[in-house]
Image (spheres, helix red, strand yellow):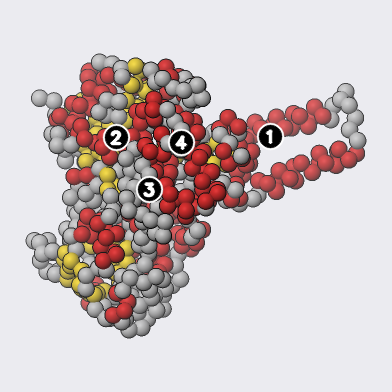
Amino acid sequence: MWWQADEQRGWRREGCAWEPEVVRRLQRDRAPQTQTGDGETGRAGLRWERQGDQRRHISNPDTRVMDPLAWRLLALVPVFLSLAASLDWQTAHIYDPFEKCMHDPDYERLLKVVTLGLNRTLKPRRVVVVGAGVAGLVAAKVLSDAGHKVTILEADNRIGGRILTYRDRKTGWIGELGAMRMPSSHRILHELCKSLGLNLTKFTQYDENTWIEVSEVKLRNYVVEKMPEKLGYKLSPKEKGRSPEEIYQMALNRAIKDLRTLGCKKAMMKFERHTLLEYLLGEGNLSQPAVRLLGDVMSKDGFFYLSFAEALRAHSCLSDRLRYSRIVGGWDLLPRALLSSLSGPVLLHAPVVAIKQGTHEVRVHIKSSRRTRNLKSLTADVVLLTVSGPALQRIAFTPPLTRRRQEAVRGLHYVPATKVFLSFRRPFWHDEHIEGGHSSTDRPSRVIIYPAPGDGALLLASYTWSDATAPFAGRSLTESLRLALDDVAALHGPIAYRLWDGTGIVKRWGEDPHSQGGFVVQPPMLFQTDKDEGREYDWSVPYGRIYFAGEHTAYPHGWVETAVKSALRAAVLINSRISSSGSSSSLKEPRIINKVGHGHLTPSHHRHHHHHHHHHRCPFESGQGTHSPASHAVTAAHSTLKKS
């Protein structure tokens, strides 16, 4: 069947989708030229040149004379090509059940909110946003642009949440301790960056010269792509000679067929019941050595005991076949640019401990501290909670959250994620012709990600998540850096020891006091019945005057754009609330979006401003002021290890 076609039959992964190679080419030809630098323009130009050569060859008098009808048909070819090329990019995805299932029905609407902003409100409201991660900052930005009075409360001493950039003061090199890449399909995030004046460049996900090491057998990536069995896995005949990506896709073909025949909802309910490991060995029909290969080389073992549905969602946006971008100068420029464009205050060191909801307003209580002793509570018409699941559990709600919502909060399953950076005197991996991408190993470091040429020698020496973080858990900074250094030396030789400058940094998101985890990945549903509507909880439904947003409230988990989408959805709902008196019934668990009214705006909310920019600007106009102080970045001074 067509939907089971694999790469060798002309199907390629592109932009979180499976699409025919011919459509992908047409898309590439019509795509606007960006600064990703992957040479698409040149290739397209060559193709048209070749077609021009063919036309010249056809018009050669030595060739056989064509009849007038054939000439007319030939003349129509460019017309058909231009028509095909002018189709919206989504057309290629309509026929793909996988892409259709993963696509957000409101995506284009949310994209318009980024480009055009919300409708300007005639009834400005007091909005308190809890959490100054990217979700909180985006929501605050679009709501304040629409005329609302927004205050952000942040428990930490910095903004950005899980966007956290490490900056070495001596060298100026940077390392992303949190978010580091965005796939080309994340158009909302691309547009947001563009509108804030941030420059993007290519993030190299794959370099054929990087290494894969398993059981002390070390091969270049380009060898493993052609013959993974050389790593020592006893693959079946159908698995031999296929790249790890192709083997994984071979297993997913059955799932794609299920999406086609059962429909998205039923198929995903089915996938929620199984772990990835069960699926790969069962319906995926892979051999045990092939599954071990995927675990070792593609780090799929982090998903093995988690929901297969979650693995599918993750695969839609994380693959060596996709194109990725990063923010020039560091990802923390995104929260800093958002902060610069806000008109309301952002209060740091202000953890929310209680939220009391009344008929006409909400009171938000802040934990008393030396910094916030003059501010015990804020009154608002609406509260938007963008904090992580564990942080939600630390807030006392009056009246309490419904049982269903409490279960949803407790049911969020965060996996840890750990990054270890090592600073070297020079990028010695260039000697091996490695200019980006990642090496994989079955040693504790698992994945090593190389900086781009010209970006220095600060190496992401280990990126682990889920169970793979265990070797670094509870280790001291010295021990963690040494462990990662040993693994780098195992791949690249003793030159790693000689060129290490003795400094580095470790970030364990599972031990972060605010996020308490890297990102959400759900385990399988144990008690699901056929009558169940699945685990999905509609976080967009408000609890009276309280709204929710963040990476945990939308799909796919673990991506910056997901947090942005959830923030835009919440902002749209808050901006469209009806102004009327609330009622107690609004605190029940509604089936539809609840539209409860607000009290009127009062000026008392602005007494505690840290900074004011009383001005109006077009939606997402790039801020021209100076960026916020250095508290938004991590510097080497925080956790630098010197050689003793």
| Amino acid type shown at disc 1 | Trp
Residue at (35% x, 77% y) in the render: 596
Question: In the picture shown, does residue 510 fall above or below 67?
Answer: below
Can residue 337 be seen in this snapshot?
no
At mark 4, the secondary structure is loop
- Residue 3, given in percent of the width and then of the height, sits at 58, 41
Indicate which disc, 2 or 1, sits on the residue closer to the N terminus.
1
Residue 580 placement: quadrant: bottom left
The label on residue 48 is 1
Residue drawn at x 86%, y 38% is: 71
What separation in Å lies between label 2 and label 3 (alpha carbons)?
A: 28 Å
Marks 4 and 1, how far apart at CA: 40 Å
Label 3 near label 2: C-beta < 8 Å? no
| Circle number at residue 463 | 2
Q: Nearer the viewer, mark 2 or mark 3?
A: 3
SS assignment at label 3: loop
**Earlier sequence position, callout 4 versus callout 3:** 3
Q: Which numbered dot is residue 273?
A: 3
Under mark 3, the amino acid is Arg
